[in-house]
């Protein structure tokens, strides 16, 4: 196994063993989703975003591709594609960094300290510079609308689902006949 491949595996395992929920996209270890929580004491606190990560073949020598799947209002995140404008990831990446750094340091720093002078979302950058309270309100609206935790919308577990038999006859058959009426001969 080559060194970049071992490192990719090691970094991914380290991320999976941390507090992040990781969901693999394919059978390989190059594409996956990570559940990312907004930083505490920020206007993003309470939000939960799905982040897509793609590791290039040359990882860790080449930076991972990171993008928001869940909509976010931020000057340095493209609203349509979710692309992130982050110098550390895009230009100054080093093999010394790993995936945990991306989620524990780089993305929280991006949300805490937006750079409106290098925007991917020009509207958010202009609003942030022109009217900070309205910008912060818009961020909170996006968090509320798009980045709410999924606890109350969790899929039912198989224990909570009705079996086919229960679904087909979920009560007294006589009641069903009374409601539907008698069949034509």
Image (cartoon, grey):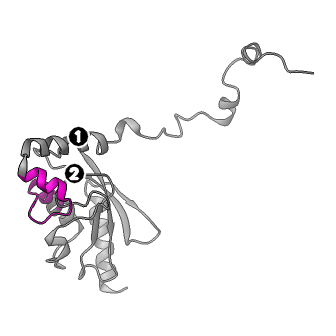
Q: Is residue 63 above or below residue 174?
A: below
Magenta region, main secondary structure: helix
Label 2: which residue? Answer: 73
Report whether 63 appears left or right of 41.
Answer: right
Residue shown at the point (53%, 40%) measured from the top left: 158
Secondary structure, mark 1, is: helix
Q: Which numbered disc, 2 or 1, marks the residue that appears first in the sequence?
A: 2
Looking at the image, do the residues carrying marks 2 and 1 touch, with CB atoms under 8 Å apart? yes
112 or 74, which is in the foreground? 74
- The answer to if 127 sits in the magenta stretch is yes
Image quadrant where residue 183 sits: top right
Q: Where's residue 96, x and y in %?
A: 15, 77
Q: Where's residue 74, x and y in %?
A: 18, 54
117 or 168, which is in the foreground? 117
Q: Where's residue 18, x and y in %?
A: 25, 58
Q: Is residue 54 above or below residue 109?
A: below
Image quarter of the C terminus? top right
Residue shown at the point (16%, 77%) measured from the top left: 91
Residue shown at the point (10%, 44%) measured from the top left: 41
Secondary structure, mark 2, is: loop
Label 1: which residue? Answer: 141
Q: Is residue 57 above or below residue 147?
A: below
- Magenta residues, as a range? 107-129
- The crowd level at tag 1 (other Cα within 10 Å; few <14, some 14-19, many 20+) is some
- The crowd level at tag 2 (other Cα within 10 Å; few <14, some 14-19, many 20+) is many
Q: Is residue 63 above or below residue 46?
A: below
Image quadrant where residue 24 sits: bottom left
Give the Cα distance between marks 2 and 1: 9 Å
Residue shown at the point (71%, 17%) measured from the top left: 172
57 or 115, which is in the foreground? 115
């Amino acid at each position: 196994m080559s060194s970049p491949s071992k490192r990719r595996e090691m970094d991914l395992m380290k991320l999976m063993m941390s507090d992040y929920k990781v969901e693999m996209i394919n059978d390989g270890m190059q594409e996956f989703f990570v559940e990312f929580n907004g930083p505490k004491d920020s206007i993003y606190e309470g939000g939960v975003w799905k982040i897509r990560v793609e590791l290039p073949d040359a990882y860790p020598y080449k930076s991972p591709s990171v993008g928001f799947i869940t909509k976010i209002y931020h000057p340095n995140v493209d609203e349509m594609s979710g692309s992130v404008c982050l110098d550390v990831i895009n230009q100054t990446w080093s093999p010394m960094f790993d995936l945990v750094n991306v989620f524990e340091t780089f993305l929280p720093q991006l949300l805490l300290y937006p750079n409106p002078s290098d925007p991917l979302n020009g509207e958010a950058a202009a609003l942030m510079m022109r009217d900070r309270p309205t910008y912060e309100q818009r961020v909170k609206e996006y968090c509320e609308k798009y980045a709410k935790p999924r606890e109350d919308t969790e899929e039912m577990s198989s224990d909570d689902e009705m079996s086919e038999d229960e679904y087909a006859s979920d009560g007294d058959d006589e009641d069903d006949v009374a409601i539907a009426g008698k069949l034509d001969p």
